[in-house]
Image (tube, rainbow, N blue to C red):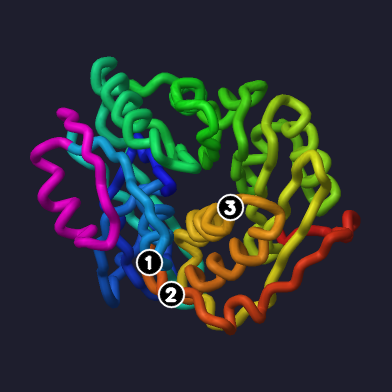
């Protein structure tokens, strides 16, 4: 079983709009709302493909009914009661696939709510193989929330963290199985621009040298690269039919963990992210053979390759 922990879940509203004109009036062609949050997305994708997954989320009594109604029966949930109401995030999706996101900060967590969230995650994780800490931290959550979660887990449980900024930086030097930054998050972490695949690899190797066992970097149109003590593997795909890139990184991580989180999981990870890109909203369709067929894997990455802007 895979357990995900989402300290800052959301209701994700997706508005499909004509080209966005700043300062003008924009009329949405359609609107959808889904229960979201990065860890919830990961658990939902895993459950869609028949893998046991549980999402641990903090929700107030007032927010719970609406959130769980949107989620439906797609994902098993372990709810931790808090006082604040769930945030609402808005994605503006233009016809060419451009996505503009506006994310609320989320409700403030009180110290006792932070402790209750950590305790519930540890209790649920007793029979799991992986625990995934995903997403931003809400106000009130300590910056080292994910390291604290990792250190509290039973021996033998592997951990993955998909976060950014200070929450990701707090993971450096800690014993963790995996971190999954995107290129921009990795640039922030190492405090320098990364223009080529080789520069991304070197930055990730720097992190692996600080206690992290493996780094999975999502690179958008350039695919993804896995760096660990055994070497480097790059996988990519040239695809058409991109509908919405929101949730592609969560699908990438879910696919990687679904097959055990080893090097052989990179092809599955990219295939699942392709399926997400070809799906409307954050609720992806099942992965298809054509998604796998589009993936090309390189065991000797072209380090001088310049990445898409």
Specify the quadrant that holds the C terminus: bottom right
Q: Which residue is under mark 1?
A: 48
Residue 181 seen anywhere in this rendered image of the structure: yes
- Of residue 228 and residue 307, the one placed in the foreground of this image is 228
* Disc 3, SS: loop
Residue 132 seen anywhere in this rendered image of the structure: no
Q: How many marks?
A: 3
Residue 308 coordinates in the image, percent (x, y): 73, 62
Residue at the image position 43 percent from the left and 74 percent from the top:
286
Magenta stretch: includes residue 253: no
- Mark 2 vs mark 3: in front: 3
Residue at the image position 75 percent from the left and 46 percent from the top:
227
Residue at the image position 78 percent from the left and 29 percent from the top:
209
Q: Which residue is under mark 2?
A: 286
**Residue 8 falls left or right of residue 70:** right
* Disc 1, SS: helix
**Residue 90 falls left or right of residue 97:** left
Sequence-earlier tag: 1 or 3: 1
Span highlighted in magenta in the image: 60-83
Give the residue furthest to the top.
111
Which corner quadrant of the image does residue 83 belong to? Answer: top left
Is residue 201 shown above or below 126?
below
**Residue 303 falls left or right of residue 113:** right
- Of residue 108 and residue 206, the one placed in the foreground of this image is 206
Q: Which residue is under mark 3?
A: 260
Is residue 180 shown above or below 218?
above
Magenta stretch: includes residue 80: yes
* Disc 2, SS: loop
Whether label 1 touches label 2, CB < 8 Å: yes
Whether label 1 touches label 3, CB < 8 Å: no
């Amino acid at each position: 079983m895979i357990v995900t922990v989402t300290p800052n879940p959301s209701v994700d509203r997706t508005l499909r709009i004509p080209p966005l004109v700043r300062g003008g009036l924009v009329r949405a062609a359609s609107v959808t709302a889904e229960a979201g949050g990065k860890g919830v997305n990961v658990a939902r994708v895993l459950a869609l493909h028949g893998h046991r997954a549980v999402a641990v989320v903090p929700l107030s009594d007032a927010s719970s009914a609406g959130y769980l109604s949107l989620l439906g029966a797609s994902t098993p949930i372990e709810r931790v009661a808090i006082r604040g109401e769930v945030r609402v995030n808005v994605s503006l999706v233009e016809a060419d696939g451009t996505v503009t996101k506006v994310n609320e900060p989320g409700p403030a967590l009180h110290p006792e709510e932070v402790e209750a969230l950590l305790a519930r995650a540890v209790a649920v994780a007793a029979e799991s193989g992986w625990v995934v800490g995903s997403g931003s931290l809400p106000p009130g959550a300590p910056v080292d929330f994910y390291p604290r979660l990792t250190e509290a887990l039973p021996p033998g449980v592997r951990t993955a963290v998909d976060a950014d900024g200070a929450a990701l930086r707090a993971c450096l030097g800690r014993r963790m199985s995996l971190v999954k930054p995107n290129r921009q998050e990795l640039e922030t972490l190492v405090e320098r621009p990364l223009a080529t695949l080789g520069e991304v690899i070197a930055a990730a190797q720097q992190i692996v040298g600080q206690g992290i066992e493996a780094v999975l970097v999502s690179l958008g149109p350039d695919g993804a690269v896995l760096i660990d003590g055994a070497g480097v593997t790059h996988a990519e795909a040239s695809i058409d039919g991109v509908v919405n890139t929101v949730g592609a990184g969560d699908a990438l991580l879910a696919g990687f963990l679904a097959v055990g989180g080893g090097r052989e999981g990179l092809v599955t990870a990219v295939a699942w992210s392709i399926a997400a890109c070809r799906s409307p909203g954050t609720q992806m369709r099942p992965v298809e053979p054509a998604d796998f067929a589009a993936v090309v894997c390189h065991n000797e990455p072209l380090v001088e390759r310049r990445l898409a802007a």
